[in-house]
Amino acid sequence: AMGGRSQLLMLSHRPTTEPVSHIMQSFDIEQAIFASSDRGSVKGYQLVARSPGIDRAMSQCLCRWAPTQLPSDDPEQWVINYFPIDDQRVAVTRTVIGGPEYSRRGGFQVVTLILVLTNEQFQAYRCNPILVVKTALAVGLLRLPASLDCEQLAPANLPVQPLVLPAESRRSRVVDSNGDSEQALLDSIVELVAELVADAQRIALIGADDPVRLVDNLIGKLSVDARRGFSFTTGLAPTVRRPFQAHFLENADLSRQRTLDAQNIKRIELNG
């Protein structure tokens, strides 16, 4: 599944009113929403809502990395994306299918929910975007709002530390041979990809059944310093304007393969 349908899917459907902790400390982070709108002088995809700390330069960067299409119109599918904004801040985003487009042409709009963290805040999450996403979903963030009419957002409140453990701290304890062989295969893939990432090679992993789990394991193989620069998407198509270092794709037809090759993105077939 494009966005991972295991633990993350359960978190994404968790009631937002459920308290996680009565004494949980949090810090304020900036947030924004990228979607299609006909409000104002600009019509089409744009930042339809943002918190006060997102200035014009940051807005332009966020718009450049945000997509207007998803590979599927399935509302149950979504993708996670991560990229550095500048030397001081990074963005962790979740792209989902929203309601009908304002044009009323019958299509659904693509909505990207954006969290912006400072380097210090990101380091509190071990520079691991997956920990940010899982914690954000658990406290009601990165979810499609009931309405996109609000242009001004308050800063989001994120716990000062992750509510889940990273992959390297919760290695699979499956004892049957199938589980062991699956983990061994995952480890071998992760080792290969980590070497390519260290060499600054852009990659596309094709055929990942659980891209979130794969990314989580891969991040655990990278140094904390290297993690900040490791941009990735768990499902967006490769384009020149969004130069993710790693793409996780369900499949790649001949046209997609040519696009990858043209951008010097190394293809790794996971089911080959």
Image: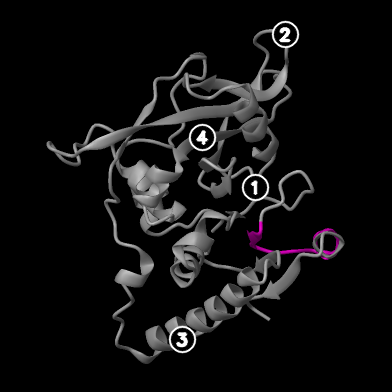
Residue segment shown in magenta: 245-259
In contact (CB < 8 Å): disc 1 and disc 2: no
Inspect the image, locate mark 2, and give the three-letter code of the amino acid beneath it: Ser
What is the secondary structure assignment of the residue under circle 3? helix
Q: Residue furthest top?
A: 40
Q: Mark 2 touching mark 3, by CB under 8 A?
A: no
Q: Who comes first in sequence, dot 1 or dot 2?
A: 2
Disc 2 from disc 3: Cα separation: 54 Å
Q: Amino acid at mark 3?
A: Ala
Asked if 228 appears above or below 109 in the picture, the reply is below
Where residue 111 appears, as percent x and y from the top left, is: 58, 33
Q: Residue 37: x and y, percent?
A: 65, 18
Residue bearing mark 4: 113
User: Would you name the residue on which mark 3 appears?
Assistant: 184
Gap between marks 3 and 1, in whole Å? 31 Å
Residue at horizontal 33%, vertical 77%? 172
Residue at 45% in and 39% down: 117
Q: Which residue is mark 2?
A: 41
Tell me the distance, in whole angstroms, between the alpha carbons under discs 3 and 4: 34 Å
